[in-house]
Amino acid sequence: MKIYNTLTRQKETFTPIEEGKVRMYVCGPTVYNLIHIGNARPMIVFDTFRRYMEYKGYEVNYVTNFTDVDDKIIKKAQEEGVDASEISTRYIAECKKDMEGMNIRPATVHPLATQEIDGMIEMIRTLIEKGYAYAAADGTVYYRTGKFASYGKLSHKNLEDLQAGHRDIKVTGDLKEEPFDFVLWKPKKEGEPAWQSPWGEGRPGWHIECSVMSKKYLGDTIDIHAGGEDLIFPHHENEIAQSEAASGKEFAHYWMHNGFLNIDNQKMSKSLGNFFTVREIAQKYDLQALRFFMLSAHYRSPLNFSAELMEAAKSGLERIHTAAENIKRLQKAVDAKASDTKAACEKGMSAEEESLYEASEQFQKKFEAAMEDDCNTADAVSAVFELVKYINTNVSSDHSNAYLQKLFERLKTLCDVLGIQLALKEEALDADIEKLIQERQTARKNKDFARADQIRDELAQMGILLKDTREGVTWKRA
Ligand code: AMP
Ligand code: ZN
């Protein structure tokens, strides 16, 4: 697999630290509001990358944080007259709902900055001991940027240029040694959340959070660190400076950055006010369409959001769903035609079907080749469309159930990697009904007859009639 590494500015073959395993950290959102669709882009593209690595057989340890202490959270809490933790708890829950709607799998761990303060104090202490940080008289701890020799290696900036750029903006009263030194620990201000530390009460700076959470859950050196391209400088540059100075080891082997989601060719951001929340999009579209829209472009390219492109994504998705539903419908027709359903199901593929099925492998290979090339989901989506077209021209009720099922599974495998659900409406409903019936059986076993009756009524309202037979419970639609 080739990955474009921001560090070297070229595509490189991916070699994991430990065979068969990927350790990956993705910078997560600051939770002070509903997430916007720009924030959704890294979530969707790196979730897809993770799914592909798992498809290839890797065990992926995927860590993505929530920044739950920050100026913006505090400001919002003050506006509402509540605790900062109330704001962050609320928006973490809302973010998780959006993630579920976009079929983004929960990470292996979702650490919260406020739960990791001890580790941050520890790392800051190490940096001070090694001469990479210093505490100013007011309790602020700064990173001594000039001491880290390779500062700028990720963003390809050099310290002299940065120095020149900063010269004019030195703030009076600032206790920094140098203008480009950045904050590791800030002293408490009235009404702000704070923790005890060797430098007085205060809270951590933003950059130290990710260095510490990455180290704690993935180790000193990780395979991949990812996030939006706006994070390259200063956030990721500073993370490298902190982590590498503290551990003496390389922090991350590969750095992946997604391009921006724009609107009217302008960066979508909360500060510019030109954004849509995921929730707003969900009122108009199935969030699967939003996911599909994001994957229709290469993750490193800028992507312009427009109603036309969303409509195109929606109809593209429908084409895939229709092909899948068509196969299922044909399978039912094949069953219905056969006098003996069991025999129809067990009948294998004919020689002709074998070769038709084999020919469909080329689309899976194309899909893989696209994903191998720096996670090119745009080309991978094209390969899925080619498979859909092939399916549409090569299935009928004259085929065997086995052949239809194999094609369905191939389509499903590729859609699973993209995180596109093929769950057919009726099937999804069937699964819900079975679950309720199971629950009713358990309730009856536990002599919770009130719950059992309640479930029967619920099902009746859905138009489902239950029949208790000697073989168990059967059901039919009224
Ligand atoms: P923030 O909450 O601003 O720290 O952003 C969380 C993540 O969303 C980061 O990885 C950002 O780079 C990313 N992000 C924010 N806005 C956009 C955008 N318009 N397009 C793509 N990624 C974005
Ligand atoms: Zn980060």
Image (cartoon, helix red, strand yellow):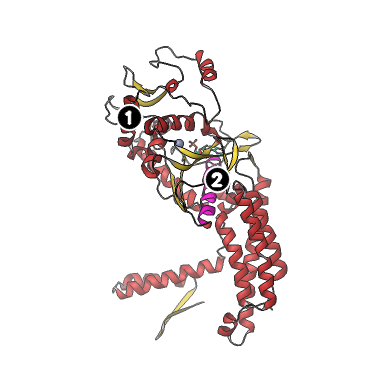
- Between 445 and 136, the one lying in front of the other is 136
What is the three-letter code of the residue carrying label 2? Glu
User: What's the magenta bit mostly, secondary-structure-wise?
Assistant: helix
Q: Secondary structure at mark 1?
A: helix
Residue 242 horizontal/vertical position (percent): 41, 30
Please tell me whether residue 169 belongs to the stretch shown in magenta.
no
Q: Secondary structure at mark 2?
A: helix
Stretch in magenta: 36-54
Residue 52 horizontal/vertical position (percent): 54, 53
Residue on which the image places disc 1: 126
- Write down the quadrant of residue 260 in the picture: top right
- Write down the quadrant of residue 211 in the picture: top left
Q: Indicate if the residue with disc 1 has its beta carbon within 8 Å of ligand 2.
A: no
Which residue is drawn at the image coordinates 40% and 22% (left, top)? Answer: 144
- Between 399 and 102, the one lying in front of the other is 399
| Position of residue 216 in the picture relative to residue 12 (left or right) | left
Say which mark, if any, is on residue 280.
2
Say which mark, if any, is on residue 473.
none
- Mark 1, residues whose alpha carbon is within 10 Å: few (<14), some, or many (≥20)? some
| Residue extending farthest right | 393
